[in-house]
Amino acid sequence: MSAKVCLLVPIVAGEVDLPLLKRMAARGPVGMDVQGFVRVPEGDALLFKDWPDMAEGLACIMYLKVDKAEAELLTGETDLAVAATKLAALGPREIVLTQASGVTVYANGRIFQAPFTPRSLAGRTGRGDTCFATYVGKRLSSSPEEACRWAGAVTTLKQERPGPWRGSPAELKALLESRERQA
């Protein structure tokens, strides 16, 4: 089986281990959401804890997705650009950082940003997965800057309705064009 990229997006620590991560990386580029390595179930709670194999694991990753809280946990930095730079130094080529207001991407030594501007938060659940999948999917054919713009726009639209994004290309195009006019 071949793929242009494999996305690993576990929910909690223990679902994907370091040996599996290494096997996947040996087969091709890997995108990974770090939540499944730092979210640790303890009793009825989910706690954020350091990832003991972080340096070795991140060395296997091409695209890394973290949210603001995870970036701070892993780097000790509250500035997203600084956190992204530190994470990239461990191996991932591109970092996708999400927070309530939008997405920040670090790629090729540059920072790109796109806002989330939903009219409603009815579909907030799953915005990180939507953002990451959109970014990596668009990167297969576009620049990091363009993929970041798309990720911000699709995630904006996704948050307005519960469930997965089922919007149309016309809806996405209209939002992207509206943002270009405002810039």
Image (cartoon, grey):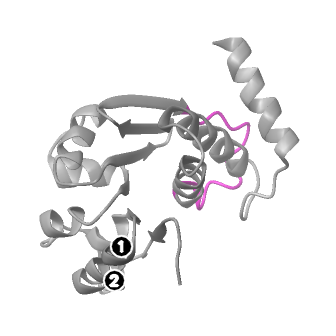
Q: Quadrant of the C terminus?
A: top right
User: What separation in Å lies between label 1 and label 2 (alpha carbons)?
Assistant: 7 Å
Spot occupied by residue 103 in the image (x, y as percentages of width and height): 48, 39
For the magenta stretch, what is the residue range? Answer: 115-128
Q: Earlier in the sequence, mark 1 or mark 2?
A: 2
Which of 118 and 8 lies nearest the eye of the viewer?
A: 8
> In the figure, is residue 79 to the left or right of 138?
left
Residue corresponding to mark 2: 16
Looking at the image, how many numbered discs can be counted on the residues? 2
Tell me the crowding category of disc 1: few under 14, some 14 to 19, or many 20 or more residues within 10 angstroms, Cα based. Answer: some
Question: Pointer 1: what residue?
Answer: 36
Closer to the camera in the image, 21 or 162? 21
Looking at the image, residue 24 lies above or below residue 180: below
Residue pictured at 52% horizontal, 77% vertical: 2
Mark 1 and mark 2 residues within 8 Å of each other at the beta carbon? yes
Q: Is residue 50 visible?
A: no
- Name the side, left or right, on which 71 lies relative to 24: left
SS under mark 1? helix
